[in-house]
Image (cartoon, rainbow, N blue to C red):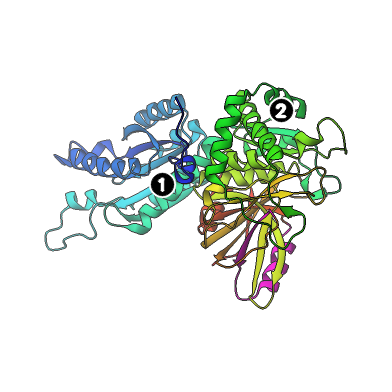
Amino acid sequence: MVQAVPSFEAYFERRPAPARVGVVCLGHHLYWPQFAGLREELLGNYEVFLAGVRACEVELVDAGLCDDPLSGAAAADALVRADVDLVIAYLATYTPSAHLQPIAQRTGRPVVLAALQAEAALDYARATTYSQLVNDSIVSLPEICCALRRTRLEPADAIVGQLRDDPRAWGRLRQWCDIARVLHVLRRGRLGLMGHVYEGMLDMNSDPTMVTGQLGPHVAHLELDDLAAEVEAVDEAAVDRQLALVREIFEFPQPGSDPIAGLVDEGELRWAVRVSVGLERLVANHQLAGLAYYHRGRPGAPQERLGSSLTIGCSLLTGRGVPIAGELDLKNCVAMLILDRLGAGGSFAEIHPIDFPGNFVLVGHDGPHHMAIAAGRPVLRGLTVLHGKAGRGPGVEFAIRHGAVTIAGLTETADGGYRLVVAEGESLPGPIPATGNTNTRVRFGPDIADFLERWSLAGPTHHFALGVGHQADTLARLAHVLGIECVVVQRA
């Protein structure tokens, strides 16, 4: 039976990345005997809140009502057992800070405080103590923030707003659910490291121990020989299926102006497709969430052809949520993973030539790209030279989706810490060079030269992740809970 080949859209379609969010409802047990029905009404409001969090498409762990220190401790134990990525505390009414303290302390997870008032305002002519308590979400927020900070458990965020019909407040909560997706993969993920850094790129060097210690993922050390073994095990039927997929996804245009970028050689295409299947096997067998690789290669050496034929497979995997960074840029692999789990893509990129009359810069690279955010179908060109690298083979070319974009570079500081360098811009329509590389026209702020000066002086690596949407606020909040610095060079 012949299997149907999925369309471009179907192949890259994904559900939101997983996250496990713990939610608690904070109240005060002394109110219940004093005000009949108050507890039940507040729990009804809590159900509205839970429905809103569920709509963010996360795995929700409901730890229930915490209305005294003992119930707070029991909720903390339940959230620890569930191994949540983030805790959201819904302040249903006034609650003493001791009810939340054990949750923040025992889970060790970021805690977001949500003081969402049930009604827009009191009906002052009919107001009662009961109706005030129904709307007292804000009262204990300063107390809780003070208590957490005094015990070195600073809250991740405090959100004040309305329980219903409040886009600002619920937008922030959705943002935190997206951050939880990043925390989920960083805490549990495995990143492959295969090869060595491109010679002379001093900004690329990374300490895998510090990646694990400060950011979370385990770094698995692999050899190109591991990939070679997987490629050797691929059968011809699998190559045929993958080749049909590649022909469905890519366009194969006539050569453009670049003499090294021509038609794709059929033999090299089939080999690159075989390598892409082997790469998928490598990722699956080593349970990788991402991979950084580089193989310098020597002309005629056994692995030269393998090391220079990875772009198709890397781009297919990156577009499906397994970011792969070239030139062994482990830090940029993490940056790409972060943007991907935020739903923003995250393509491997660097600064290319400036268009001074148009006041924009080309942003792209010759390596793996996030094909799910491409503007139209990507192009395959046959490259006779991989500039600065050994070998030859098919190159992937496209621009990313037009509209709002963000670039995020993860770099190491002189003291061994990490810093996110972030800028927001706009992807513009227009032609790109026919070089078999990605290139996107991006405008940053009123003057491109001024922006690039400020960007460079912030000390990013020369590689960064390019994603869709404006993500600076989300990335700044993520950096805060990771305990790393964030420099926002440009907001749109």
Mark 1 lies on a secondary structure that is strand
In the displayed structure, 219 sits above or below 204; it is above
**The quarter of the displayed image where residue 128 is located:** bottom left
Say if the magenta span includes residue 439. Answer: yes
In the displayed structure, 127 sits above or below 66; it is below
The spot of residue 87 in percent (x, y) is 43, 38
Mark 2 lies on a secondary structure that is helix
In the displayed structure, 281 sits above or below 110; it is above
In the displayed structure, 349 sits above or below 3; it is below
Q: Which mark is drawn over residue 113? A: 1
Return the residue nearer the eye: 467 or 477: 467
**The quarter of the displayed image where residue 434 is located:** bottom right
Return the residue nearer the eye: 355 or 170: 355
**The quarter of the displayed image where residue 24 is located:** top left
Q: Is residue 201 left or right of residue 331?
A: right
Q: Which mark is drawn over residue 227? A: 2
Q: Residue at x 68, y 54 (%)?
A: 437
Q: Residue at x 58, y 47 (%)?
A: 370
Say if the magenta span includes residue 440. Answer: yes
Return the residue nearer the eye: 449 or 75: 449
The spot of residue 453 in percent (x, y) is 73, 68
Q: Could you tell which of marks 1 and 2 lies nearer the N-terminus?
A: 1
The three-letter amino acid code for the residue at tag 2 is Leu
What range of the chain is rendered magenta? 436-459
Quadrant containing the N terminus is: top left
Q: Which mark is drawn over residue 272? A: none
The three-letter amino acid code for the residue at tag 1 is Leu
Q: Residue furthest left?
A: 126
